[in-house]
Image (cartoon, helix red, strand yellow):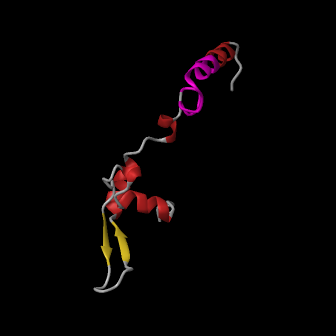
Amino acid sequence: MSGLSRSTLVELVRPCDRNGFAPPVEAKHLRRKGTQRGVVLINRASLQEYLSGLPSLAESLGEHGRSPTALPPELDAALDKVLDELKGKGVTA
C-alpha cells in the first residue's frame, strides 16, 4: 500500500535506535491472550502525515542534483566550481 518494506514499517512503528526510541508513526499490536504472535495495525493517517513531512527528492539533493553528503566537502566544493564553469560555457551536466 505504501511501497515501504516490512522492516522499514517496523522501524517507523516500534521504538528502536533508528527512530530515537520515539516511533514517528502510530500503530496498535493486536494479539489473543496467551499467544506470542499477533497483527500490527498501522494508522494510515499517521503514516501519510509522516511521509508528507519528509523532504522531496529535489529538496534533499544539492544544487547540481547530487546528495550534499555524497562527497567530502573539499571535493564537493571543487566539483561545484567546475560545474558552474561548464554551465557558464553552456555545457549542462
Is residue 69 on the magenta stretch? yes
Is residue 73 on the magenta stretch? yes
Number of numbered discs overlaid on the protein picture: 0
Nearest the viewer among 30 and 92 is 30
x%, y% of residue 39?
38, 76
* 32 versus 42 height, above or below: below
In screen coordinates, is 73 left or right of 83?
Answer: left
Nearest the viewer among 87 and 17 is 17
x%, y% of residue 62?
53, 29
The residue sitting at 41% across, 45% down in the picture is 54
The residue sitting at 36% across, 52% down in the picture is 50
* 65 versus 40 height, above or below: above
* 30 versus 63 height, above or below: below
The outermost residue toward the left is 33
Nearest the viewer among 50 and 68 is 68
In screen coordinates, is 91 left or right of 58?
Answer: right
x%, y% of residue 46?
32, 58
Q: Give the range drawn in magenta.
A: 63-80
x%, y% of residue 25?
33, 58
Picture quarter with the C terminus: top right
The residue sitting at 47% across, 65% down in the picture is 1
